[in-house]
Image: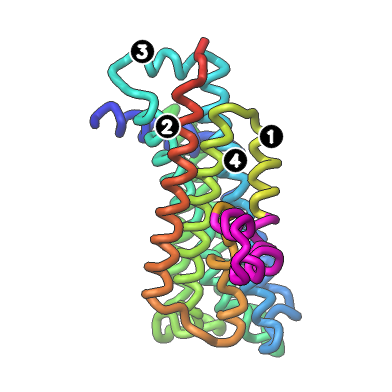
Amino acid sequence: MSVYWTITRNTFRELIRQPIYLVLMVSSSVFMLFLASLYYAGAEEDASMVHSGVLATLFLCGLLTSVVGASSSIGQEVDSGTALVVLSKPVGRMSFILAKFTGLAGALAVQCSVGGLSALLATRMAFDVYGKPDYPAIIIMASSILLAFVIGLVINFFARKPFVELTVYAQLGCIAIGFLIINCLSKDWKPHTFGMDIDFRMLNAILLILMALWLIAGIATACSTRLGLIPTLVICLCLFLCGLVSDHFLGSHAEAGSWSARIAYSLIPNWQLFWMADALALKASIPIHYLMYAFLYTSGSLGISLGLAIALFEDRELK
């Protein structure tokens, strides 16, 4: 078990040390805040545009992270021979794959935490289109993001620590602190009740996006045992697009009794299950029992994808 967690920890650290990870994390947060700062985005009838925009940004950045992370942690290690060195120690191939996935899932959770704070803050910034912009949120969040880079640079210069990894941790801490400070202030820089303008229904929607990203990561892990970055990305995108329309094209046929439609409908992930922007636009809440159902669905689908990944990797010849 200690070897398993060692591989998990190393995989996690390798992923958050990649510059693309930091770029995707920061750029997604900046884009969410930019989207919420636009005047049209704050109109009451257009608040759903902010919900859809920030959730879509969170998912797409996570999808790219999943594919790049799985390809680098499995595919590149197999091609370079690193995987063979690791497997020469007392660790099985199943443990190797599961540990790689666990490290990737942890990296996605960190990325989703930073993006989730920005998404929650976007719901506050998107309400007053006819008033002035939310200057406290804009100024404090911009300062938090820049401060995290300064912290990373200073520690890297004096302590010779990895800049990207340090900056990732600094971004998480600075944005979290900035989020807390902003929610203690009104849009006029006056103290007010914490979180009064935040739509906390978004929190459950963010959790559902994280579950969807874990499912994508499982699929990317299975693909990366045999394929490179581009084929893995193409397969994940195709499954994503097919899953978006599976209700329309396969749902009715499956209910009508078509066995082929039922099999296809069961195997293709239903991404609509994780998309709650429409519910948020209708002012509906996301109940806990729905989250539990989504978690069970994700667990079952992950069992299939990771089982396939283990089966594919067991027969893979390593050089």
Q: Which mark is residue 88?
A: 3
Task: Sort mark 1 into few (<14), some (14-19) or many (20+) by Cα contacts within 10 Å.
Answer: some
Reading the image, the residue beneath label 2 is: 97
Counting residues from the start of the chain, the first of labels 1 and 4 encountered is: 4
Q: Amino acid at mark 3?
A: Ser
Could you say where residue 84 lies in the image, as x and y percent from the top left?
44, 14
What residue is at 62 percent from the left and 71 percent from the top? 256
| Mark 1 and mark 3: Cα distance apart in space | 28 Å
Reading the image, the residue beneath label 1 is: 231
- Which numbered disc, 1 or 4, marks the residue closer to the eye? 1
> Residue 289 lies in magenta, yes or no?
no
Counting residues from the start of the chain, the first of labels 1 and 3 encountered is: 3
Q: Which residues are magenta?
A: 241-266
Task: Sort mark 2 into few (<14), some (14-19) or many (20+) by Cα contacts within 10 Å.
Answer: many
Q: What secondary structure is marked by label 4?
A: helix
Picture quarter containing residue 181?
Answer: bottom left
Could you say where residue 12 lies in the image, as x and y percent from the top left?
42, 37
What residue is at 55 percent from the left and 63 percent from the top? 141
Q: Amino acid at mark 2?
A: Ile
Q: What secondary structure is marked by label 3?
A: loop
Q: What secondary structure is marked by label 1?
A: helix
Could you say where residue 214 lies in the image, as x and y percent from the top left?
48, 50
Above or below, comparing residue 72 to residue 239 in the picture: above
Question: Seen in the image, is 193 located left or right of residue 260?
Answer: left
Reading the image, the residue beneath label 4 is: 67
| Mark 4 and mark 3: Cα distance apart in space | 26 Å
Front-most of residues 7 and 110: 7
Q: Amino acid at mark 4?
A: Val
What residue is at 24 percent from the left and 31 percent from the top? 1
